[in-house]
Amino acid sequence: MANGSVTIREMDIDDIALVFHMGEHLFTAREVPNLYRTWDEYEVVNLFQTDGEYCLVAEKGDKVVGFALGTTIEKNRSSWRYGYLLWMGVDPEQQGDGVGQRLFSKFHELMLAAGVRILIVDTEADNEEALRFFDRLGFTDPQEHIYLSLNIDDERREYEERLHARQVRRAQKDEDDGCN
């Protein structure tokens, strides 16, 4: 599939659900369990509402085949403006066709126009494909960060069971008090 038939454009409101569902398949907890940002509908909608001009889709025909969602950051007491590519995804059937390169090129162009001086991306340390991709784009000096996770799902269920039991006891007590 020639990448010349791919169009990169600003995301519009009708793309939100398509982008979200594509991301659901790409950024799963099973595949990327330690994401400090979670892929959810709020993430997509919030970026679209606050930084829509930095939310892009790749379209082939009438199908969205990729996306890039970013923002700019200004730090207090700094004259520098940073660009941050938070999420980028390409339909697995389109990977290797230059879709990611084209999305990034458009994002890069938008960041230049916004006065950005440094671009930031992050990925999992073991995501070799993403690391190679960003290396080819000129990103250097990768810094490792450690994110720890604690699965408290079992504890949450136990808490909810205790809470429910307490509510049942309270309702029973109120019922008993009402009968006396």
Image: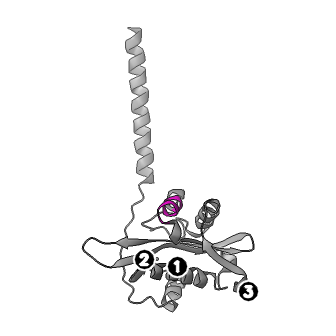
Q: Which residues are magenta?
A: 44-51
* Residue type pointed to by label 2: Gly
Q: CA distance from mark 2 to mark 3?
A: 29 Å
Mark 3, secondary structure of its residue: loop
Q: Quadrant of the N terminus?
A: bottom right
| Crowd tier of the residue under label 2, counting other residues whose Cα lies within 10 Å: few below 14, some 14–19, many 20 or above | many
Is residue 47 shown in magenta? yes
As displayed, is residue 12 above or below residue 164? below
Q: How many marks?
A: 3
Q: Is residue 107 left or right of residue 170?
A: right
Mark 1, secondary structure of its residue: helix
* Residue type pointed to by label 1: Phe
Lower position in the chain sequence, tag 1 or tag 2: 2
The residue at the point 71 percent across, 85 percent down is: 4
The chief SS type of the magenta part is helix
Residue on which disc 1 sits: 107
Which picture quadrant has residue 171? Answer: top left
36 or 166: nearer the viewer: 36
Q: Mark 1 and 2 residues: CB-CB less than 8 Å, in contact?
A: yes
Q: Mark 2 and 3 residues: CB-CB less than 8 Å, in contact?
A: no
Residue 151 marker: none
Whole-percent x, y for residue 18 in the image: 65, 63
Mark 2, secondary structure of its residue: strand
Lower position in the chain sequence, tag 3 or tag 1: 3
* Residue type pointed to by label 3: Ala
Residue 2 marker: 3
Residue on which disc 2 sits: 83
The residue at the point 62 percent across, 62 percent down is: 21
Name the outermost residue toward the top: 180
Which picture quadrant has residue 147? Answer: bottom left
